[in-house]
Amino acid sequence: MDVVERTTASIGGEWSVYSGPAAESCDRAGAAPGARWSYIVERVAPAGVDPAVDVERVEQAWEEQGIAVERSESGAADPLLGVRGSGGPVTSIGFNAFPQRYSVTGESTCFDGSVDDLRGVGEG
């Protein structure tokens, strides 16, 4: 969640939660199942801003956090831009700088924990 929030702060503007933060189960090699967080935020794309500049800001913010980055773009004449990341504090993270909508989708690394405990199942 922290990486998603740092990402949106690097770009600025008002973001809204699309999904999460949500606890999900995950498998860890040679260990009991664990948990991870997923989180998706979005905003209306800013008018008059070059999306490539925001992609560069996100790349820099992620690299500073030890995340390996890879740019993506569609093959259209006016390509849709984005960047994907992995490693460091996340399993995966993505930023899409589409003309109508920006979005950041993050998934934390798998950690010791129970999804039921994180969701508060059985409390009452």
Image (cartoon, rainbow, N blue to C red):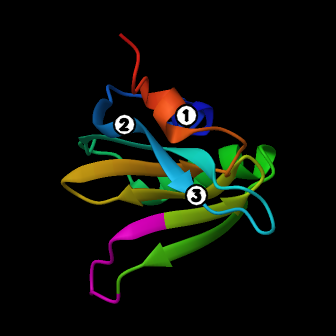
Q: Which mark is residue 1?
A: 1
At numbered mark 1, what does the secondary structure look like: helix, strand or loop?
loop
Residue 29 within the segment the image draws in magenta: no
Q: Count residues near mark 3 (Cα–Cα under 10 Å), then give few for <14, some for 14-19, many for 20+.
A: some
Q: Are marks 2 and 1 in contact (CB under 8 Å)?
A: yes
Nearest the viewer among 62 and 114 is 114
Query: Which of the two discs, 3 and 2, sits closer to the camera?
Result: 3
Q: Which mark is residue 94?
A: none
At numbered mark 2, what does the secondary structure look like: helix, strand or loop?
strand
Q: Is residue 82 above or below residue 13?
A: below
Type of amino acid at the residue the image marks with label 1 = Met
Q: Which residues are magenta?
A: 75-82
Q: List the residue tagged with mark 2.
A: 20
Name the image quarter holding the N terminus: top right
Q: List the residue tagged with mark 3.
A: 26
The answer to whether residue 40 is left or right of residue 76 is right
